[in-house]
Amino acid sequence: MITCFPDAGPFRRIGLILLFCAGGALRAAQDGTGAVAGKVVSAETGQGVAGATVTVAGTLLLATTDLNGSYALRNVAAGMRTLAVSKDGYRPAEVTEVAVTAGGNVRVDLPLQASADPVLKLEAFSVSAEVVAGSDIGLLGARQKAIAVSDAIGSDQFSRLAVGNAAEALGKVTGASVVDGKYVLIRGLGDRYSNTLLNGAAVPSADPDKRAVQMDQFPSDLLDSITTTKSFTPEQPGAFSGGSVNVKTKSFAERFFVTVSLGATHNSNASGEEILVAPGNLGSVPAVSVLLPSRTQAELAARQGNFIPAEELDRATKLFSAGMYPGREKAPLNTSGSLAFGNRHAWGEDGLFGYIVSATFDRSFAHSTGGEANRFLGTPDAPQARLLLSRDRSQLSFDPATARSAPAFGVTASTESESRGGFAKLALRTSPQHEASLDLFFTRGTDSEVRRGVGEEAINYVGSVFEVYDVLRTERMVGSAQLAGKSVFPAAGDLQLEWRVSQSRSTQDQPDYRTLAAIYTPGGTFVNATGVQPNRFFRELEEDATESAVDLTYPFAPGGREHRVKVGALASENDRDYREQRFQYGLSPRSRNDFETFPAPVGILGRTANNVTFGNTVSRLQEPNNYTGEQKIRAGYAMFDGQLARDLRVIAGVRFEATELRTAPRATVGSTPKPGEIDQTDTLPALSFVWAATPKTNWRVAYGRTMARPTYKELTDIRYEDVFTGDVYLGNPDLELTVIDNFDLRWEWFPRRGETIAVSAFYKRMRDPIEVLYEPTVGSIQPQNVARGTVQGVEFEFRRDLRFLHRAMADFSVGTNLTFVASEITIPARELAILRAFDAKASDKRELLGQSPYVFNFDVTWDRRASSTLATISFNVVGERLDLVNFGPLPDVYEQPAPLLNFVLSQRLSARWKLKFSARNLLDPDHEKTIGLQNSDLIHARHTKGRSFGLSVSYAFD
């Protein structure tokens, strides 16, 4: 049942929290004091400096930086202040003209330069707060001083660009694009060539079809930053090539704060429109015996006076109470909200305890009509339709005007999505040298999708109407608990120990996935067709992961040049259990009325002394797709990071990573599935140079060897059929790992804080890349290894404010990034032979699956600080990418560009209140997949998403 507004309970609880906390929020302003917080970093490496002392000149206020270099000073008297920072082995520094306001908070990051003689007392390095704010100090620890080629996007950009989750945020990163709103492709490479970490620990995938994590599960309100590392260093997991994505949740609270936000969004396709809705869900698998008697067995037993099988079949059938045919209801506005609060408190003499808690909710609706889903076979000169679910009625072999009682032709799809997320962080610093934290992350999402297709099954039932429905509810959950610690031992030369233990679980449940299809003549007479019996599926996936890691870092600074040696080890285990149960009705609809009330009537309709009359009954099919999977990874590494000269840095090392990956299909009667197994150890070397040509420019050169693993499903000997389209997925237990050699070159310039200009080039050489092959004659899809492949490209990035053009343009900033990618793989001999049977000159090369030839992002921001007004318009487009490889003469399937244009306007109404308006997908393009390249007449799939207009209000105090 659709309701216009969520339960008022959460809003009531949010209000109580606001009332409870409001009193404490005003004390600082009444006392005429403010707070200063920030980070002390090494000017050479960008690493946080632990144990540094930060003081406010002329006062007794003092703070010691934690193990990350962070500090916080409270009760600082309002006015212009000077901060001083010192640490043994570093040149003292001070920042003047720090403007502190009553009740306000100011962030000041402080650089420290290493001293060649730790005993010699050096003159303090002094700089004004204005200069600090305009410099690159805020980027030192992230990008400019990073040891790898990387890009990052933070919480401030999340708000400015109106991104709602991690997937949308990554779509703004240089070289990144998003598929299906959840899977991230980096540098044009498929999702298998990226990995996802949550606070540095691997996240299991809840998707049975992909190794990639569904990034839309991470609401942006729970996140602090997302860093994408594009070149390999030995301290990272080795299973990536395009990029390694580290999602970092909210950090240690620097002060007390509470924020709350509520919003509503109107979608032009869905809001206020009648959409398709599921007719109810069972929610769990009915308790049906594995030895459920068939209809024939029950009828034969009844003739002999034994009605026990018939009664068992009647009981089992009636457990499936929910109907098959979807209903219709009006969709309300999309709604969302978030709440976050946190604080820190003194712990003993030098310790500190902090916490942060946040929660989000979101409910949205999507709807599209006039979509398409078509399948073709034949040759390029004479393509033949196998299935036509198209709004283009001219392709049908009959006059659709004569079809009676048929809904609109083509594909209609409706989705209701709900998500709830929560995050909690507890951090304890017992002294400036020791701290530990506990991170708890949980998100649960539900997508209820109904698809209707009307068209023609153009091979076996030419001239008849084919009507098919999917009713699918998908429940996803990701839960993670991570305990981590960091210690510095001054007596051992500032030896640093980092450790973490994490446990996570991902689940995906599809309770009562229903498919209903019928074939009837244009006049309305239903055809008694085989192969279209209605089905009900129950699918459950559980994936558990544990990971333990330890890292030791030993810093030393001969001659004032900072070096560090780092070693570490990792052990992880991942277990997956996939279960599927499938039930089928013995009868198909016989009329339109039957179709809409199906499966009624069910069970026993009548009985005599030696006979039974049945309505519709279910039968239980074998479950050939059930499987278990296990992955164990053991890794160790050693690396050196040091300055060969003051402006030249080298990072070198090697990682050893052992993979044990096994899948075991559950055998059924008459089947002997082959288990999948990979057991190998890889040596992954890495070498990088960073030359700081000037204080604001870097040259980077990097090499690293990485790998890509197949998914559990790909490695499992299973057969899975998509009833809606007829496509059949086949696993391949003979798959092997892909090994990649990666080469990177980048020049980057940081004119001012927050400004970047960069040019990058990359080249990747692959051995045994995994491609997905599509056989259109039978509609089968199967992964396979191909011999070799290459990927090469260039990236351009520009982000600056426009004051360099004219002072009047200081409020405007422009950001753009552009990636060009070219890839090539060797076509397998079997596929090439079929291609050359129709074209003797067919090339033996093609592009890599999922690779886009270009990715372009552009945004313009107007930030009028005098009026607290912020407006951003952003544009994104991704070039056509190979979606499916046709095994045969037909051209391959390509996903076509779908430009995205968004606009965001936020206005601060007061110190506490902020209003935000967003307009998304303003161009509302067709999302198309075509047989062949752009402008092809053969549409594989097509739909639209509609325009969205949202308004939200937030309240914050600290």
Image (tube, rainbow, N blue to C red):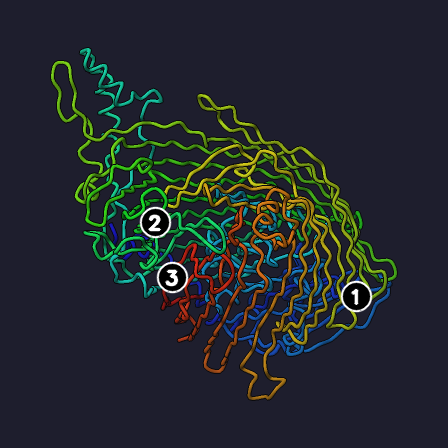
- Asked if the residue at tag 1 contacts the one at tag 3, i.e. Cβ–Cβ closer than 8 Å, the answer is no
Which mark identifies residue 691? 1
Q: Position of residue 781 (x, y in %)?
A: 50, 42
Disc 2 or 3, which lies upstream in sequence? Answer: 2
For the residue pair 638 and 876, the one nearer the viewer reads as: 876
For the residue pair 600 and 259, the one nearer the viewer reads as: 600
- Asked if the residue at tag 3 contacts the one at tag 2, i.e. Cβ–Cβ closer than 8 Å, the answer is no
**Residue named by callout 2:** 449
- Asked if the residue at tag 1 contacts the one at tag 2, i.e. Cβ–Cβ closer than 8 Å, the answer is no
**In the figure, residue 920 lies in which quadrant?**
bottom left
Disc 3 vs disc 1: which is toward the camera? 3
**Crowd around label 1: few <14 · some 14–19 · many ≥20 (10 Å):** some
- Helix, strand or loop under label 1: strand
Residue at x 18%, y 11% (from the top left corner) = 305
**Residue named by callout 3:** 945
Q: Label 1 is placed on what type of residue?
A: Trp
For the residue pair 499 and 686, the one nearer the viewer reads as: 686
Disc 2 vs disc 1: which is toward the camera? 2
- Helix, strand or loop under label 2: strand
**In the figure, residue 678 lies in which quadrant?**
top right
Indicate whether 446 appears above or below 296. below
Disc 3 or 1, which lies upstream in sequence? Answer: 1
Which mark identifies residue 606? none
Indicate whether 652 appears above or below 39. above
